[in-house]
Amino acid sequence: MARWDKDDKPSIPNWFWEAVETEPQTRQIEIDECDVAYRFYPSPGKPGMLLIHGMNAHSRWWDFIAPQLLDRFEIAAMDLTGMGDSDYRYKYNSETYAKEITGVLEHSGFESDAVVVAHSFGGYMAVKAASLYPEKLKNLILVDSGIRHPKDPIPDRMEMGGRAKVYPDKENAIARFRLQPPQPCENEYITQYIARNSLMPVDGGGWAWKFDEDLLTTLTEVERQPEDYQTLNVNLGLIYGEKSELFSRRALEYMRELVPNSFPAYEVQDAQHHVFLDQPLDFIDILRKLCDDMGV
C-alpha cells in the first residue's frame, strides 16, 4: 500500500502501518459460477482462521487486524459475492453464502478445527454455514452479530441500496464515506484507509464503491430465526460493542437461552457496532482471550 499520508499524519500509530503493509496473497475460488476472492496470510504450521466482513464491506476491513494474529493463526479474509473483489450474482441467499464460506475454508487448506470470525451480516451467514455444514465449521466467533431480542426495537433499515453513485475522483468519494449503520469513529485514519480501499474505477471515468447496487433488492432467505440458534452446534464465542445499536446485553441473554451450549462473550468498552474500528487493539486482545477460552 502506498503510504498515502504517513508523513502528513505522524499521529497514526506505527502498529497500524506495520499491519497494513503486510502483503497477503490474493486468491480466488469459483463457487456456483462466480469467483470468490480472498486474501491469504501464510503462517505455516498454525491453525486456520477465516475472517468474514459485514454487509457492503469487504476483506480489507481486516487489513490492520489479520497480521497481528499471525503468531497464532494462518489467516484468510474473504469477500462475499456482491462485495469487494468477488463477482456479482443475479440473486443472493444464505445457502449460497454458506457454500462460499465453506469453500474458502477448504480452498485455504484449513482443517475443520479452523476458527471463523464473522462480523455483523457475515456472522448471520456463518451461522447458516455452521447449520448446513457442521462437519466443516466447528469454531465460530460472532462479532456484534446475533439475533435481536423480541422486545428490542427494530433498527432502521440501512440506506445502502439504490443506484450506485459515481464520483469524479477518489478524494471526492472518500470525503463522503460513511459507516452503516451510522456511527462516529474516533479513529479517522482507519475509516480513511477503509474508504480508500473500498473504491473501484468505473468505465468511462470516475469511481464507485465496491459492492453490487442490487444486492439488497435481490437478497433473499437471510432472516434470522430462533431455530437457527437453537440448533447451533458449534464451539461458539461472541464479542460485541458496549454502545452498539444492533446488539444489546438483552440480545446476549436471549442468545444464551436459545443456543444449546454455554459460550463465552466479551463486551468491548467504548465500542459501537464496528467494534474493531472503534477499539482495534482491545479487540485483538479480547479475540485472543476468547480463543483461549474456547480452546482454539
Image: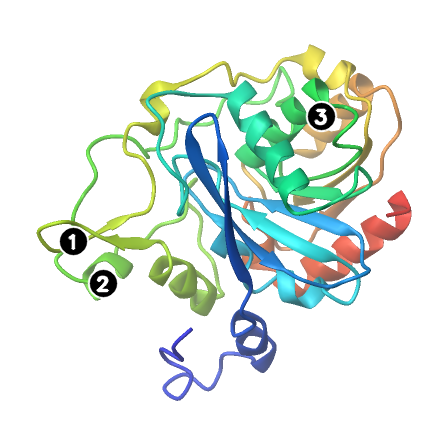
Q: Position of residue 71 (x, y in %)?
A: 77, 67
Q: Which residue matches tag 2?
A: 170
CA distance for labels 3 and 2: 39 Å
Image: 127 above or below 9 = above
Q: Which mark is residue 130?
A: 3
Tell me the quarter of the picture where residue 188 sits: bottom left
Residue type at mark 3 is Ala
Horizontal side, residue 60 vs residue 252: left or right:
left
Lower sequence index among marks 3 and 1? 3
CA distance for labels 3 and 1: 39 Å
Q: Residues within 10 Å of mark 1 (few under 14, many from 20)?
A: some
Q: Nearer the viewer, residue 131 or 239?
A: 131
CA distance for labels 2 and 1: 7 Å
Q: Nearer the viewer, residue 130 or 272?
A: 130
Residue drawn 18% across the image and 50% down it: 202
Q: Which residue matches tag 1?
A: 167
Residue type at mark 1 is Tyr
Residue at far left of view: 204
Residue drawn 43% across the image and 40% down it: 181
Is the C-beta separation of discs 2 and 1 under 8 Å? yes
